[in-house]
Amino acid sequence: MINAIIDLYTKADIEGISSKLLRSSRWQQHHFTAMGALQAQPLWLSFLAQYGVSECVSHTHSVGAERETLQLVLQPKKLKNPVRLTFVIKHNGTFIKSVKCVVDTLSLANNEYVNTTVNNSSVIPKLPKSDPIIVSDLDNQLHPTTFHATPSAICELPSHTARTLDNWWQIWQTNNLAQFETLYTPSATAVLAGNTQPQPISALLDCHLDFTQSLSRRYAQLETVEYDSTQNQATLCWTLDGSFNAKNVRVRQQIISVISISDNQITHEVMQFDTLALNQQFAL
């Protein structure tokens, strides 16, 4: 499965990845859900047509109880700078059941074409029409005793890892920003949307604060949690709902966080979300 996805981007092997998908297989990308290879192929072909076949600069792979995580840093032949793609894959060993793919469209938008003759060399990704969605408004004051899911509640984790991930989740669910001081190692790094290079963990705090300024009445909600015990690495798919202040519209950002842990502290975190797909879906 992993090689088929890598070959899709590095060899343009459409047939290989198509053979792994059933009609009921879901490929989610750019806030759009394709059912089966027939609907997914336009997504793949659009990427290849816009950016060309890519060289794989780096890839990391982790395996959880139900899903695998693949992180790719690709250098497309038509672009000057690399781009990151993150995949969370559920399969049965023969066929793919579902894929959640987050393309860092912010790094694409900040990219440039190689040897372009066009005056405006900035890259504008061609995105599919997003899935229709209505984001509900949760008022915590109306539900003071509601249980809000934590990583340890939906995934079997070692006790120390469970404590670390639950504390990490408090940063986003309850704005417990003091966790940044104790939860991360002094040399911890983060990779955020728009940048393929590791940054100091202070950049992650800035990202959180940016969300607090652009979104009001925020609510973070977990979708899936996978844990690779051999690498002590967790992958969390989650959403952040909020009212976009500039337009007073309720939005939902889909996020994948990949967290590496050592001695009960976080050493590295990758946080990926599709900025341009969000802007298109909610006309921001």
Image: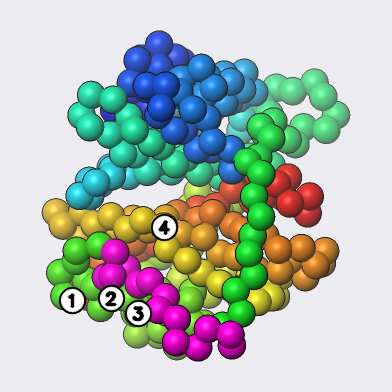
Task: Please tell me whether residue 269 is drawn above or below residue 173 in the rendered image.
Answer: above
Indicate which disc residue 164 carries.
Answer: 2
Residue at the spot x=83%, y=33% of the render? 120
**Spot occupied by residue 143 in the image (x, y as percentages of width and height):** 53, 83
Decide: marks 3, 2 in contact (CB < 8 A)? yes
Decide: marks 1, 2 in contact (CB < 8 A)? yes
Please state which amino acid type lies under the numbered disc 4: Glu
Q: CA distance from mark 1 to mark 3?
A: 11 Å
| Image-quadrant location for residue 104 | top right
Which part of the image, by quadrant, shows the N terminus? top left
Decide: marks 1, 4 in contact (CB < 8 A)? no
**Spot occupied by residue 186 in the image (x, y as percentages of width and height):** 35, 78
Q: CA distance from mark 4 to mark 2?
A: 18 Å
Pointer 3 or 4: first along the chain: 3
Q: Secondary structure at mark 2?
A: helix
Pointer 1 or 4: first along the chain: 1
Q: CA distance from mark 3 to mark 2?
A: 5 Å
- Circle 1 is placed at which residue position? 160
- Circle 3 is placed at which residue position? 167
Callout 4: 10 Å neighbours few (<14), some, many (20+)? Answer: some
Q: Is residue 78 visible?
A: no
Name the front one of labels 1 and 4: 4
Indicate which disc residue 223 carries.
Answer: 4
- Magenta segment includes 217: no
Q: CA distance from mark 1 to mark 4?
A: 22 Å
Residue at the spot x=19%, y=66% of the render? 157
Q: Is residue 144 visible?
A: yes
Decide: marks 3, 4 in contact (CB < 8 A)? no
Pointer 4 or 2: first along the chain: 2
**Spot occupied by residue 265 in the image (x, y as percentages of width and height):** 27, 75
| Image-quadrant location for residue 59 | top left
